[in-house]
Image (cartoon, grey):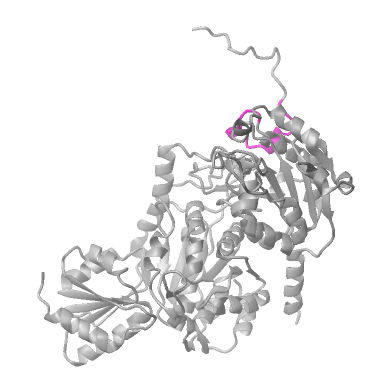
Amino acid sequence: MNDEPIIPGPARPLKPHRLLKFLRQEILPTAFCPGCGCGTVLNSFAQAVEELSIDPKDMVFVTGIGCSSWIPSPYFKGDTLHTTHGRPIAFATGVKIMRPDLKVVVIAGDGDIAGIGGNHLVHAARRNIDITVLMVNNWNYGMTGGQVSPATPFGVPTTTTPYDNPEHPLEAAELVAAAGANYVSRWTTYHVFPLMESIQKALEIEGFSFIEILSQCPVSYGKMVDMRRASDFLKFYRDQSVRVHKAKEMSAEELEGKIVVGKLVERQRSEFVTSLRRINERFREG
Amino acid sequence: MDKQGYDAIRKLLGESPAFVQGDVACAYGAVLAGCRYFAGYPITPATETAESMASLMPGCGGTYIQMEDEIASIAAVIGASWAGEKAMTTTSGPGFSLMQENIGYACMTETPCVIVNVQRSGPSTGQPTEPAQGDMMQARWGSHGDYELIALVPNSVQECLDLVIEAFNLSERFRVPVIVLTDGEVGHMREKTVIPEFDELKLVERETPTVPRESYVPFGGGEAAVPPMGFFGLGYRTYVTGLTHTEKGLPATSSAEEHTKLVSRLCEKIRQASESLVRIEERYLDEAEFAVVSYGITSRVALNAVRTLRRRKKKIGYLRLIGLWPFPEERLLGLSKQVKGILVPEMNLGQVYHPIREAVAGKCRVAHLPKIGGEIHTPAEIVEAVQKLMGGRRR
């Protein structure tokens, strides 16, 4: 037997990453595929929590089913409710109403949040309940191997639209903005620093906050469109994204196929749990 | 709940005895049991419970929310339970069907919660305003996979109140969803209802961990254990998942050993307690040669029929199932050794008839008297069916 390691290790042991303290280290490494964008989202999210000095024991993570639901569950070391497919926002509503002092964060994918769970998304945004939702949009059902999702672009092949997708994608961020959320933005895994700042903003703001994060899936999605490397997607995000203020000056034709990134909405509509408690207290005081 | 909290609730509920609907009595039972979260969705014939909870919750320091559908209702109830509160939802057939996946989730994650199903005639939209007993099997088997839960069946408005309190207690004790199966008839009729006094209320609260976070085992314990619940905000950073999980709560989806250990414990914690969960009412069973076994609204007609037959000197007994799941097999087996035949009247085309036949295992005859369409049995129908059973030859 050769005792030499196959990959020679560094001369000195690496210092543990400073954000590792947030993770359930006993279950690492993650289950994400090579090149997956979920690691970038996890990194940006952990950095945002660090920047805001939030104690994870004051956070509750509620997730659905799909690759990106694994970003906090099981990896992030907080109270975590890993729920049924599509329902994390509904579960989170129960948690938030009874424990408004805790920061409730939902992280899940486009299939979970905008597909099977679309109803809950619209109504949580309408109520403007103080929950932060990160919708990691990888344009497909990645965990099951690359089926068409409500966010898959028009005209591309997936395993269940092998002759190209005849459906138009849902613009989830615009939908949530229209439904009444207090904060909505869209970023990609290429825009890591603005993304991190946006996550901070979403965690701080009172009311429903929603970030659509375009995140690469070079394995399940990429295999069908010949984008097999993470860098294929990052270059695409870089070249095709347009900032919100620029997009306002562009025509519909010019915006065709572009990714509008930046803050879509920031406002101060009354938050649901606060209103609910105020109404209930008014009743109690007679 | 302390005396002050009780007095505040009593002030809201008003005079005792009250004269209220079964649906309203369910709400009374819930607030007395300490329920402080209700999520629901309007559906006939269960809407009155939601309306009552909406009006009662703020005064009790609780919260009512109307969710966007029944899937969201049960989801929010489970979320509130993990936030540390006693929580309930009510529905009827179509909504109960929608809730099934998350009821399985509550079993898998050992989440205490109460679901009242005011049964109406199905399948599908069926007869929305008419009563039925068509969800007895769905309550037990509606979600996928192996699981056990508890189901109780009231037959009066008083029992709606009493059994909802009991449902909360059992739910907290066993960390399992408890289903109360009423029906459109019990839910909508009004009866005299006595509100229990403070010292009559015996409430059970879920056990919480006392050990430090590092040594807390959220889903562990022996083969039939009910582990203490480190719910959110206590600092345990509990990881709760519907995936097959280890004692620590972490996913172990490919392990036959972990799955067998977990799911066996979830079932055994109810199965091994089944004797303590027997809730039956027995009357006229001394020297009975035949018996009517019934439950819910049908049992009230059955009792009338049994009394009529007793007046005619027929040796007929009466057994009412109050606790339906886990099924009181031993009691039914005992009854079958005593009597020559059992009649099972029920408002479906054959549901509780089947576990009775299974329990009896051929030791006596079991005849079925189904009735659907939203009408309850008449006493004459049951008397006639019993006479037919008495006259029939043993197979």
Please determine whether, in this image, residue B26 is positioned above or below residue A71. Answer: below
> Image point 31% across, 66% down: which residue?
B328
Residue A48 sits inside the magenta stretch: no
Residue A27 sits inside the magenta stretch: yes
Q: In the image shown, does B221 or B31 lie closer to the viewer?
A: B31
Q: In the image, is B119 to the left or to the right of A256?
A: left
Please determine whether, in this image, residue B172 is positioned above or below residue A258. Answer: below
Q: In the image shown, does A161 or A4 lie closer to the viewer?
A: A161
Question: Farthest residue toward the top?
Answer: A2
Q: Position of residue B351 (x, y in %)?
A: 32, 68
Q: Position of residue B192 (x, y in %)?
A: 47, 89
Q: Position of residue A202 (x, y in %)?
A: 79, 50
Q: How many marks?
A: 0
Q: In the image, is B115 to the left or to the right of B355?
A: right
Quadrant, the N terminus of chain B: bottom right
> Image point 41% across, 51% down: which residue?
B145
Please determine whether, in this image, residue A13 is positioned above or below residue B273. Answer: above
Quarter of the figure with residue B387: bottom left
Query: Is residue A191 visible from the viewing direction of this image?
Result: no
Q: In the image, is B300 to the left or to the right of A283?
A: left
> Image point 10% across, 69% down: which residue?
B395
Question: What residue range appears in magenta?
Answer: A16-35
Dominant secondary structure, magenta: loop
Quarter of the figure with residue B322: bottom left
Please determine whether, in this image, residue B369 is positioned above or below residue A204. Answer: below
Q: Position of residue B254 (x, y in %)?
A: 46, 37
Query: Is residue B208 visible from the viewing direction of this image?
Result: yes
Q: In the image shown, does B257 or B118 lie closer to the viewer?
A: B118
